[in-house]
Image: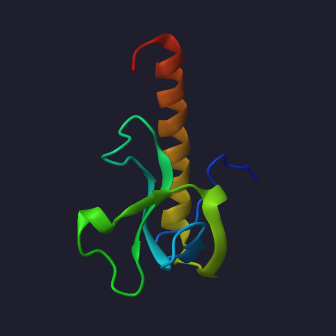
């Protein structure tokens, strides 16, 4: 089986505790940019749990290394696995474009 570079990413719907964040967060997006740092890609974007998305100002972007505890893992199936392959190819192309100065 092929080991994917982004296989560590938690599925959307996962609920986590993040270092320095008081509230539990529900992950609702992966490999996201923030308005404050549009050139940087974060592993996740989350919204406060249990109420979920209410206002863009309450979104929190964070990386996997900041996850202290996984409280609930989100849904995973073959479609998610195919999505990870797509991410792998997209990020590889992005890295290649960056190296060649196309980005």
The outermost residue toward the right is 1
Query: In the displayed structure, would residue 26 be above or below residue 60?
Result: below
Residue nearest the viewer, comparing 95 with 51: 51
Residue located at (23% from left, 69% from top) = 55
Residue pictured at 52% horizontal, 76% vertical:
14
The single residue placed furthest to the bottom in the displayed view is 50
Q: For the view shown, which residue lies furthest in the top direction? A: 100
Pick the quarter of the image with the C terminus: top left
In the rendered image, is residue 8 in sight?
Answer: no
Q: x, y percentage for residue 38? A: 35, 39
Q: Is residue 86 left or right of residue 69?
A: left
Say if 71 sits above or below 28 in the image: below
The residue located at (45%, 39%) in the rendering is 40
Front in this rendered view, residue 92 or 22? 22
Total numbered circles: 0
Q: Position of residue 60 (x, y in %)?
A: 41, 62
Percent from the top left, x then y, of residue 90?
A: 47, 38
Q: Tell me if residue 43 can be seen.
A: yes
Residue 42: x and y in percent read 49, 49
Give the quarter of the image for residue 20.
bottom right
Residue sitting at x 32%, y 68%: 58
Q: How is the image coloured?
A: rainbow
Is 60 placed left or right of 75 in the picture? left
**1 relative to 26, above or below:** above
């Amino acid at each position: 089986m092929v080991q994917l570079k982004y296989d560590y990413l938690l599925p959307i719907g996962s609920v986590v505790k993040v270092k320095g964040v008081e509230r539990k967060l529900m992950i609702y997006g992966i490999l996201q940019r923030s308005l404050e740092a549009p050139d940087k890609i974060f592993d996740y974007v989350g919204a406060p749990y249990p109420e979920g998305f209410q206002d863009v100002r309450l979104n929190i972007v964070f990386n996997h290394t900041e996850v202290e505890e996984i409280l609930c893992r989100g849904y995973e199936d073959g479609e998610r696995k195919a999505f990870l392959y797509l991410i792998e190819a997209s990020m590889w192309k992005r890295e290649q474009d960056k190296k060649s100065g196309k980005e």
